[in-house]
Image (cartoon, rainbow, N blue to C red):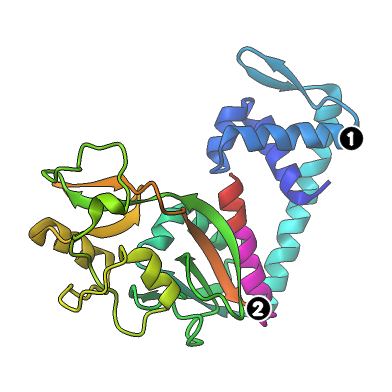
Amino acid sequence: MDLRSLRYFIAVAEEGHVGRAANRLHMTQPPLSRAIRNLEDELGVLLFERTPKGVTLTPAGKVLYEETGPLLGRADRIRRRVTAAAGTAPLAVGTLADAAQQVGDRLVSLFRARHPHVHVTLHEADLGDPTAGLRAGLVDVAITRTPFDDTGISTRVLRSVPVGVVMRADDPFAGHPSVSSTDLAGRQWVRLPDGTDPARTAYWTGGGDDDASPVMRTIQECLQAVLWNGTSALAPVDQPLPAGLVVVPLNDRPPSDLVVAWPRTARSPLVRGFVQVAENCRRT
C-alpha cells in the first residue's frame, strides 16, 4: 500500500461517491476507480459496497479508514518537518509559448501541494528556443513541444497532439476536414528566427525558406500574421484561436508531443519530483 492509494481511498470513503472524490482529487474517475480496485486486490478484500447512489464502506473498509487517518497525518507531519529543515529551495521552469497552459492549473496545484517549500521561477522562451532555456542552462526543467534536438536532454511525453494549418475563416480550405502539404504549395509561411533548431524549423514552418516571409518569435505573432496578412502557420489542432481563424488538420505530418524535459545529467530530487507530478497530470 502506498500513500497515494490510501489518500485516494480516504477521499472515496469521505465523499461516498467515486465521481465526487475524483473532483476533490482533481483527477478523472476511471484512474481513481482502477486505483481502488488495485488496492482491494492487494489487500484481498472488498473495501466498498457499490450502490446506485455511490459507495459505502464494508467492515474491512471501516477498519482501513480508522487506521489510515493517523497514518496519513503522521506522513504529512514528517513531510512538513523535513521540508522546513531544508528551507526554501529554488526551481527554474522553462516554458515554450503556451506549452505550460496545456498542462494547466493542475500541475501547479499538485506540485505546490507536494513541494510547498519550493520557490518556482518561470522562464518563457520564444519560438527560436524549443528547449525553453534548458540548452542554455537557464532552467532546471521545461514544458515544451517536439521536435527538437534532444542531445543530452531527457523527455517524457505528456500528450501527443496532431498539427494543422492555421488559416483565416474565409480561406478556400477553411471548411475542409484536412489538407495536405501539396494542397498548400505556393503559400507564404511564417519563418522562425535564424539559428533555430533545424529539426524544429523543418517541422513547424511548412517547408518554406522564403526570405521575404515574416520572422515570428511568439505564438500570438504567428496568429496575428495569419489574421491580418493571410500568412500560413502551423499549430497544434487544439491551439486556442482568436475570432476569424480556424485550424485545419494537416494529414501528412506526424503529431507533435507535449513533453516535460530536463538535462540527462540532472540529479536534483526537485527535478525528479516535477517530472513525476507532470506525469501524474498526464495519467489523470
Residue in the image at 55% along x and 65% along y: 260
Q: Is residue 41 left or right of residue 180?
A: right
How many numbered badges does the structure rendering display? 2
Magenta stretch mostly in which secondary structure? Answer: helix
Query: Which element carries disc 1, helix, strand or loop?
Result: helix
Distance from disc 2 to disc 1, alpha carbons, whole Å, reads 38 Å
Q: Which residue is mark 2?
A: 264
Pick the residue in front: 206 or 159. 206
**Quadrant where the C terminus is found in the figure:** top right
Name which quarter of the figure residue 185 lies in: bottom left
Asked if one can make out residue 104 in the rendered structure from this viewpoint, the answer is no
Q: Tell me the magenta residue range.
A: 264-278
276 magenta-colored: yes
Residue in the image at 62% along x and 33% along y: 30
Query: Which element carries disc 2, helix, strand or loop?
Result: loop
Coordinates of residue 183 in the picture (x, y in percent): 25, 49
Residue in the image at 13% along x and 56% along y: 227
Q: Identify residue type, mark 2.
A: Arg
Q: Which residue is mark 1?
A: 43
